Image (cartoon, rainbow, N blue to C red):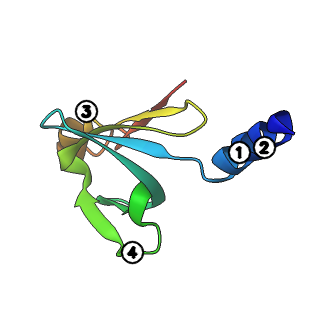
Amino acid sequence: MRHLYALCFLYVMQLSAQDILHFQNGKNDTVKVIEINTYEVVYKKFKLQYGPIYKISLIDISKIVYYNGQIEDFTNFIKAHSNPAQPLYQIVE
């Protein structure tokens, strides 16, 4: 019976996957990313998924690590933003 509870717990944890937002100032926050547009990231804090929606400029983010391990690097956003020939961000796998 304990094994059944453990499997159910792991399944529920997988359903509520979390992303990690790394800020330029070195801090991290566990979030659920909703949208990434041209200039900002829209997200909800993981512990407040029924709470407010937050928006932050891409300039303030260094990278996002998604629940599946995929990483989006935004460290070159300021450089790319000044040079339209470069992409705004890149996906690192």
- Label 1 is placed on what type of residue? Phe
Q: CA distance from mark 2 to mark 3?
A: 42 Å
Which circle, 4 or 1, is nearer the viewer? 1
Q: Which residue lies under the disc numbered 3?
A: 75
- Quarter-of-image position of residue 53: bottom left
Q: Which residue lies under the disc numbered 4?
A: 51
Task: Give left or right: position of 15 versus 45.
Answer: right
* Residue 45 is at least partly visible in this image: no
Task: Give coordinates of residue 41: x percent, y percent.
Answer: 35, 58
Tell me the element at label 2.
Answer: helix
Tell me the element at label 4.
Answer: loop
Q: Quadrant of the C terminus?
A: top right
Which circle, 4 or 2, is nearer the viewer? 2
Q: CA distance from mark 4 to mark 2?
A: 28 Å
Task: Give coordinates of residue 78: x percent, y percent.
Answer: 18, 41
Q: Residue at image x 70%, y 51%?
A: 12
Which circle, 3 or 4, is nearer the viewer? 4
**Which is more N-terminal, label 1 or label 3?**
1
- Label 3 is placed on what type of residue? Thr
- Label 2 is placed on what type of residue? Tyr
Quick check: marks 3 and 4 in contact, CB under 8 Å? no
**Which is more N-terminal, label 4 or label 3?**
4
Of all residues, the one furthest to the left in this rendering is 25
Tell me the element at label 3.
Answer: loop
Quick check: marks 3 and 1 in contact, CB under 8 Å? no
Q: Which residue lies under the disc numbered 1?
A: 9
**Which is more N-terminal, label 2 or label 4?**
2
43 above or below 12? Answer: below
Quick check: marks 2 and 1 in contact, CB under 8 Å? yes
